[in-house]
Image (tube, rainbow, N blue to C red):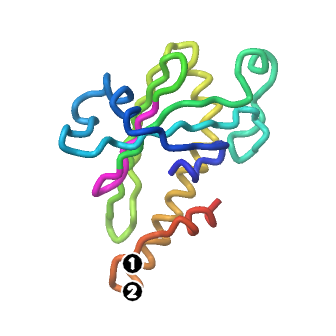
């Protein structure tokens, strides 16, 4: 999922000890149990320069150039679940997001049910919505394309198949 995001410049997994601090204030339902291995936490850097039209267009004009850096770094954890994914993000200035991605079948079609909650101060919320919507829309479109491809292969062969990392990169 990180690699599919069109504005991600780089990412790397943080040491397992980072998981403890990351989940300290998360509800118990989103924390690893004491008997589980820690959920991986990644440091992600996104390109905020606005140079990519796929990432939402060039929005960096006027005041934004003065206050928004060319790149933003944040921490995120992605927990693979039986029916999808839970993504939790902690970003600068108190921005927190929790997104669930559930994949299900309805009437022979693959459906992606995404539900997200982003909390931040009011001043940042408008910035978050306008600057990230384009990249988010592309991410969802690419993810659905992979799901449909995987579903078609599964249906065509009668056995379960998964999408490889190489296929993920081909979508981009």
Residue drawn at x 67%, y 43% is 9
How many badges with numbers are in the image? Answer: 2
Query: Which residue, given by chain and number where applicable, does mark 1 sit on?
Result: 154
Q: How far apart are the alpha carbons under marks 2 and 1?
A: 6 Å
165 up-or-down from 119: above or below: below
Residue 113: % across, % down: 38, 50
Quadrant assignment, res 24: top left
Q: What element carries label 1?
A: helix
Residue 108: % across, % down: 35, 71
Residue 158: % across, % down: 33, 85
Q: Nearer the viewer, residue 12 or 46?
A: 12
Q: Which of 62 and 26 is in front in this view?
A: 26
Q: What element carries label 2?
A: helix
62 up-or-down from 81: above or below: above
| Mark seen at residue 15 | none
Q: Residue furthest bottom?
A: 157
Question: In the rendered image, which quarter contains the C terminus?
Answer: bottom right
User: Dot 1: few (<14), some (14–19), or many (≥20) neighbours within 10 Å?
Assistant: some
8 up-or-down from 3: above or below: above
- Residues at badges 2 and 1 in contact (C-beta under 8 Å)? yes
Q: Locate residue 62 relative to residue 29 in the image: left or right.
A: right
Residue drawn at x 80%, y 23% is 61
| Mark seen at residue 157 | 2
Magenta residues, start to end: 80-89
Residue 115: % across, % down: 39, 40
């Amino acid at each position: 999922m990180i690699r599919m995001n069109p504005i991600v410049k780089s990412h790397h997994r943080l040491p397992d000890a980072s998981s403890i601090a990351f989940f300290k204030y998360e509800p118990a339902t989103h924390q690893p149990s004491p008997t589980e291995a820690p959920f991986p936490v990644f440091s992600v850097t996104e390109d905020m320069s606005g140079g990519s039209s796929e990432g939402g267009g060039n929005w960096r004009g006027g005041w934004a150039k003065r206050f928004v850096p060319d790149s933003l770094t944040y921490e995120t954890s992605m927990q693979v679940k039986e029916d999808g994914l839970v993504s939790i993000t902690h970003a600068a200035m108190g921005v927190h997001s929790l997104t669930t991605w559930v994949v299900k079948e309805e009437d022979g079609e693959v459906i992606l049910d995404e539900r997200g909650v982003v909390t931040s101060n009011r001043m940042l919320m408008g910035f978050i919505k306008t600057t990230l919507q384009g990249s988010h829309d592309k991410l969802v479109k690419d993810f659905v394309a992979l799901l449909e491809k995987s579903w078609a292969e599964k249906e065509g062969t009668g056995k379960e198949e998964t999408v490889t990392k190489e296929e993920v990169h081909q979508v981009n």
